[in-house]
Amino acid sequence: MTRIISTSDAPAAIGPYSQAVVAGGFLFTSGQIALNPSSGEMVGDGDVVAEAEQAALNLRAVLAAAGCTPGDVVKCTVFLADMADFARVNEVYARLFEGDAPPARSCVAAAGLPKGARVEIEAVAVLPA
């Protein structure tokens, strides 16, 4: 059995997918980019730190809608338009999991991201008991 997670506190899906899906005791989020949840517009004007911060806020909102916190995340994937941004995004990412044992992570360069984003973050979390 699966359950779809949706919240107005994170951007609506911009395609035929869900913000997140619960299955088998896990939460699988879709990738979050720097879209403002209210306007649906990109934020940050190309500043990768501002984009990463908004993507992290959006991810937190999706996690919260499922009753999860960043401490429940066991795996993340970070997609970067340019690996030269790795260190700057890593600083924002570290704050997302501050105080928690950081999850496993992959970070890959992508030839292109939705809406011209410079960073996208997706996560897998264990649902709290």
Image (cartoon, helix red, strand yellow):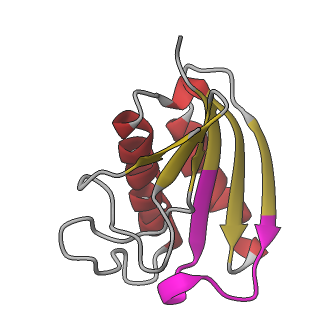
Residue at position x 33%, y 75% from top? 43
Viewer-closest of 37 and 22: 22
Viewer-closest of 67 and 110: 67
- Picture layout, residue 120 above or below residue 77: below
Viewer-closest of 27 and 89: 27
Q: Is residue 73 left or right of residue 84?
A: left
* Quarter-of-image position of residue 97: top right
Residue at position x 33%, y 68% from top? 12
Residue 80 horizontal/vertical position (percent): 69, 72
* Quarter-of-image position of residue 86: bottom right
Magenta-span inclusion, residue 42: no
- Picture layout, residue 104 above or below residue 28: above
Residue 67 horizontal/vertical position (percent): 40, 27
Q: Is residue 98 visible?
A: no
Residue at position x 57%, y 62% from top? 31
Q: Which residues are magenta?
A: 108-122
Q: Quadrant of the N terminus?
A: top right
The extreme left residue here reads 38
Residue at position x 37%, y 75% from top? 44
Residue 91 horizontal/vertical position (percent): 60, 48
Q: Is residue 102 visible?
A: yes
- Picture layout, residue 122 above or below residue 12: above
Residue 56 horizontal/vertical position (percent): 46, 51
Q: Is residue 108 left or right of residue 21?
A: right
The extreme top residue here reads 129
- Image mark count: 0
